[in-house]
Amino acid sequence: MEYSSAWVDSDEQIKIVNKILPEPKVDEVVVRIKACGICGTDIHFVKDLPIGKLTPLGHEVAGYIYSLGSASSALKVGDSVVVMNNVACQRCPQCLNQRPQACQQILSYMDDQAGMGQFLVVPKEMVIPYEGLDYATATLAEPITVALDLHREAAIQLFDDVLIMGPGIIGLSCIKLAKMRGARNVVMVGHHLDTTRGAYRSMMAKKLGADYVIDSAQAGWKEELKIKFPKLFNRVIVTSPPSTISDGIELAGFCGSIVYDGIDFKDDQVTFSANDFHFAKKRLIASHAIPNWGFPQALELLALHHIPSELLLTHRFSFDQLESAFATFNDKEEAV
């Protein structure tokens, strides 16, 4: 049987690739994809990768089990599942020493399969059954696991003041998680909050618990925060472009931690004051939620409505509307 999936082969050119669906190996699962989110990484792939490089799109995936290999008896055809995109090998020295986050033999489907398509064939360890959520809502589990990883690295304490930079799905999820961990004040920084998109995200930030929202496009925004929070912030979580890390470092207080997650294929250089960083005993920590973890927690956060999916799922498109979906994502006057 032939199936289709979405790849990018040149600057802003999405290509539909047709392949023959293979039979699953004994330890594999075939997943019929029913929903896939568009991640900021997908946008970078479409806009910033070298021309001619064929790259699969999509990794925020939910669907159901279409068929099984013989060694997957704990699962059954028809189960609703989310699909982890990267898992630890469980066999290397790091994994066997209980440090799977240091595994360097990661298993991934993202090299030769696209989550933005009709089917995935993956090791059984990559699928997590769930109940009680529709497919679109379940796709939010993946970005929420990224927020969970940021919070694990940030180690927010009771009554910390927390600055979160970037009001995308990950940053917005971080607001709720920070409040659940006992943060005193949570401040969200967004850029161009005067646009339709910016205003919508500002509203979402407040609904999710942000105590203060500020626009980094306005002159003097950092000075305003320094006056309002003279001791600055115990924890800074950066989900905005890497170029903003320097702002996060500047706004971190004494012994503060700055945790960031993000990529930019064109502008990834950061400059900051080494003296301030040294004498204030600040820490800069990279978060990268690979291998994946936290899906059960993410699914429960959605099921219990701690993170309301209706705030985050603003648009839905069919597979044959991919060009429109990406255009909408890139339109700053859309409330995405």
Image (cartoon, helix red, strand yellow):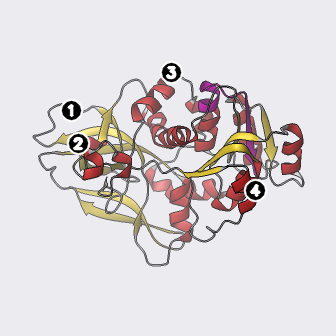
Looking at the rendered structure, the kind of residue marked 1 is Leu
In front: mark 3 or mark 4? 4
Q: Which SS class for mark 1?
A: loop
Read off the residue under disc 4. Answer: 276
Boundaries of the magenta span: 176-191
Q: Which SS class for mark 4?
A: helix
Residue at position x 71%, y 62% from top? 274
Looking at the rendered structure, the kind of residue marked 4 is Asp
Q: Position of residue 210 (x, y in %)?
A: 73, 32
Read off the residue under disc 3. Answer: 304
Q: Position of residue 160 (x, y in %)?
A: 69, 31
Query: Compared with residue 73, is residue 265 higher up or lower down, i.e. above or below?
Result: below
Direction front: furthest residue: 279
In front of the other: 1 or 88: 88
Q: Position of residue 317 (x, y in %)?
A: 51, 47
Name the disc covering residue 135, or none: none
Q: Earlier in the sequence, mark 3 or mark 4?
A: 4
